[in-house]
Image (cartoon, rainbow, N blue to C red):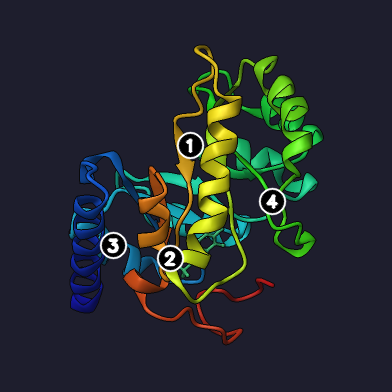
């Protein structure tokens, strides 16, 4: 687990280096550790190295780990595909949801967010490449969803998220991130600044930060490859 601390230090250094290249303060960029399919022990190792924000993609798996880690002061983000029959658990168990792209899910999360918790922070997922497999709504559908969120006091829209298809050159990686930032600039209002741009993963965090990312979602570069065997920590998950 020393490895996790070392890898985390390397990721922080990558963020610092590219922030300097972009003339940005590294503190503007939140590092979200994507711990899906990783063990509770791996999360503890990252926590011991100072990491506080963690993201999960599978509700059942997340709840098991949250129970094992309830002694830690973790901010939990949900970054998986939202299933209608899981919105109640998502509304209760997480502080943030990235990947909202359905008005019906917005309505359910609003209704199901417990009143004694702060509003659920939301990033709306936009699909800029037209690839349906990746989830997210089209830019044309964004105003309607933002409208639904604005009427939902239990939700607080923080910004936009995107998950582009992998690309190999930095210029190709930057294109969808730039599109998301431009879309955000068009949609932002004083009441709804959309100040969070949730974009960038292990392979393309530099490209994302150069285009204005304020939150990078990093799994492999912190925890190593995700176990795929059904007997591992992901047991029972798709
Ligand atoms: C798994 C996942 C990540 C992390 O991907 P890595 O390549 O391991 O850094 C980021 N965002 C989303 C939405 C994911 O599902």
Frontmost residue, 60 versus 176: 176
* Residue 47, horizontal then vertical, whole percent: 25, 57
Residue at (74%, 45%) from the top-left corner?
Answer: 137
Alpha carbon distance from label 3 to label 2: 26 Å
Q: Position of residue 139 (x, y in %)?
A: 72, 39
The tag on residue 127 is 4
**Sooner in the amino-acid sequence: mark 2 or mark 1:** 1
Circle 2 Cα neighbour tier, 10 Å, few/some/many (<14 / 14–19 / ≥20): many
Sequence-wise, the earlier of marks 1 and 3 is: 3
Q: For marks 1 and 4, give the one nearer the viewer.
A: 4
Question: Is 215 positioned to the left or the right of 24 in the image?
Answer: right
Tell me the distance, in whole angstroms, between the alpha carbons under discs 1 and 3.
19 Å
Residue 95's disc number: 1
Q: Earlier in the sequence, mark 3 or mark 2?
A: 3
Are circles 1 and 3 on residues that touch, CB within 8 Å?
no
Q: Earlier in the sequence, mark 4 or mark 2?
A: 4
Q: Which residue is mark 3?
A: 44
The residue sitting at 70% across, 61% down in the picture is: 134
Quadrant of the drawing holding the N terminus: bottom left
Q: Quadrant of residue 9?
A: bottom left
Are the residues at dot 3 and dot 2 in contact (C-beta closer than 8 Å)?
Answer: no
Instruction: Report, in whole angstroms, how far the alpha carbon at label 2 lies from the one at label 1.
Output: 25 Å
Separation of residues labelled 4 and 2 (CA atoms): 17 Å
Mark 3: few/some/many CA within 10 Å (<14, 14-19, 20+): some
Query: What whole-number distance in Å separates the C-alpha atoms at marks 4 and 3?
Result: 33 Å
Above or below: residue 113 compared with residue 62:
above
Q: Nearer the viewer, mark 3 or mark 2?
A: 2
Q: Which label sits in the foreground, 4 or 3?
A: 4
């Amino acid at each position: 687990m020393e490895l996790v601390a070392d890898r985390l230090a390397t990721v922080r250094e990558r963020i610092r280096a590219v922030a300097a290249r972009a003339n940005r303060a590294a503190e503007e960029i939140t590092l979200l550790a994507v711990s899906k399919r990783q063990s509770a022990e791996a999360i503890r190792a990252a926590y011991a190295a100072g990491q506080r924000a963690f993201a999960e993609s599978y509700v059942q798996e997340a709840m098991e780990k949250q129970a094992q880690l309830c002694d830690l002061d973790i901010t939990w983000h949900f970054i998986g595909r939202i299933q209608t029959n899981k919105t109640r658990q998502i509304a209760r168990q997480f502080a943030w949801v990235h990947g909202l792209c359905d008005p019906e899910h917005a309505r359910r999360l609003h209704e199901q967010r417990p009143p004694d918790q702060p509003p659920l922070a939301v990033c709306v997922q936009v699909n800029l490449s037209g690839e349906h497999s990746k989830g997210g709504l089209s830019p044309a559908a964004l105003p309607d969803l933002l409208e639904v969120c604005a009427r939902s006091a239990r939700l607080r829209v923080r910004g936009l998220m995107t998950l582009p298809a992998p690309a190999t050159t930095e210029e190709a990686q930057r294109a969808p991130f730039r599109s998301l930032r431009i879309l955000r600039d068009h949609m932002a209002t004083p009441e709804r600044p959309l100040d969070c741009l949730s974009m960038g993963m292990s392979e393309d965090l530099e490209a994302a930060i150069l285009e204005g990312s304020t939150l990078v979602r990093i799994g492999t570069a912190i925890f190593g490859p995700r176990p795929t065997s059904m007997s591992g920590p992901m047991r029972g998950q798709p």
